[in-house]
Image (tube, rainbow, N blue to C red):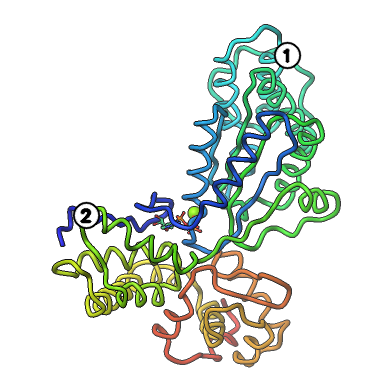
Amino acid sequence: MKAAHNPYNPGAGTPPPELAGRDPLIAQARLAIERVKLGRPSKSFVMLGLRGVGKTVLLNEFEQVAEQLGCQTAMLETDPEKPLAQQLAPQLHRILLRLDRIKKAGADMQAAFGALRSFASAFKVQLGELEFGLAMTPATGDLIVDLTDLFIAMGEAAKKRDTAVVLLIDEIQYIQKPDLGALIMALHKISQRQLPVLLFGGGLPQLAKLAGDAKSYAERLFDYPAIGPLDPESARRAVATPAERDNVVYTDEALDYIVEQTGRYPFFLQVWGSHCWEHAAKSPITLKDAKEASARAIVALDEGIFKVRLARLTDRQKAYARAMAEFGGEPANSSEVAKILGLTVAQSAPIRDELIRKGMAYSPERGLIGFTVPKFDEYMRRAMPSPTPKAARAKKA
Ligand SMILES: Nc1ncnc2c1ncn2[C@@H]1O[C@H](COP(=O)(O)OP(=O)(O)OP(=O)(O)O)[C@@H](O)[C@H]1O
Ligand SMILES: [Mg+2]
């Protein structure tokens, strides 16, 4: 088929030609935005799911919905290397500038700019021109206090202008524990005052384990919808519908095969669709086409994303990942993994933690460990045919 017409869009955060199976979540976000704008209690939520399930695509979608509903939005992809204050300040600045364009009498914008200015100086953030703004009491340097003050000033300015602020934070698992605690406490204060500020987040299923108040607020403040593979019907639609627009169809067996091979994971559906399109000579795309495309897709993934991920690991991390792969795609028991490596649980725990820190693995609950990238287990078994306990026992990482 003509490469120029290939409708599929595999990538990171790239909009799919057909956003299948996510209507309920989009409706939930829309309702939350509508409610917060009306000053009604409304729940923020954080979507948790593995790599390539479509979290970023959904955050972009929510941002569009919020913009259409007349809200002020800011999207942040968390950088693990930077403190949250530094990452948030420029985004909040942008929001304040936009709020400032909606003219209203009163000194609330000056107060908000003043709060931002104190915040920026306390956390050593360089912002553009911030001349305008009342000299406020200086910020304390305690993120909980200062972020709360800033959120309140921003929320009040938004409320007065009949709009709402919608923050979208991607890769939320990278926010350092104290910063995440502060963000939660600040949002808690905002919701107590029913100010129109909402957060939508996306991240890997493992979020920082918070302590104390932050934890109990986080539990009540947010929903955590799990986002995973598409349901079978939506998975078929994700592949079939974009082709139909170009008068290309798949046979039922071809679609069944693709749905099965991809595990219904959105990223893989795009990859498989794309290879089917490239490979098939004409419509309909048959089971034979789908099988050949599937073989090519696997080679391309191995040589592309999987190999790059494996190359980031040390020898002992590779050995640990290979042992995990013995248990298939589902999270494994870390004590069983240790057993394969010939290590005690205590000896293997640091390696497991390294894999978690590198974003390769996550722990859905105590004692369990799984790959963050679907199908990585299959790749590990292809790349390293047998587990190698020796490498893990080697002293040096
Ligand atoms: N509902 C969907 N239907 C079809 N394709 C989708 C859907 N959601 C996402 N995709 C496609 O899947 C791929 C991955 O999407 P996205 O980058 O949003 O995933 P992610 O969960 O943010 O992954 P990561 O954790 O790696 O950031 C993209 O190519 C996107 O077009
Ligand atoms: Mg993403």
Q: Nearer the viewer, mark 1 or mark 2?
A: 2
Q: Is residue 335 left or right of residue 59?
A: right
Q: Quadrant of residue 224?
A: bottom right
Q: Callout 1: helix, strand or loop?
A: loop
Compare marks 1 and 2 and give the one earlier in the sequence.
1
Which numbered marker is on residue 32?
A: none
| Residue drawn at the location 14% of the way across and 69% of the way down | 281
Front one among 327 and 389: 327
Distance Cα–Cα, label 1 vs label 2 = 60 Å
Q: Residue 101: x percent and y percent? A: 55, 15
| Residue drawn at the location 59% of the way across and 75% of the way down | 370
The residue that mark 1 highlights is: 135
**Do labels 1 and 2 touch, CB within 8 Å?**
no
Amino acid at dot 1: Ala
Q: Residues within 10 Å of mark 1 (few under 14, many from 20)?
A: few
Number of numbered discs visible in the structure rendering: 2
Vertical side of 111 occupied by 31: above or below:
below
| Residue drawn at the location 82% of the way across and 35% of the way down | 192
| Residue drawn at the location 62% of the way across and 24% of the way down | 163
Q: Quadrant of residue 273?
A: bottom left
Does any atom of ligand 1 lie closer than 8 Å to the CB of label 2? no
The residue that mark 2 highlights is: 246
Rendering quadrant holding ligand 1: bottom left
Q: Callout 2: helix, strand or loop?
A: loop
Q: Residue 326: x percent and y percent? A: 53, 88
Q: Is residue 120 left or right of residue 74?
A: right
Q: Residue 243: x percent and y percent? A: 26, 58
Q: Residue 359: x percent and y percent? A: 56, 64
Amino acid at dot 2: Asp
Front one among 73 and 21: 21
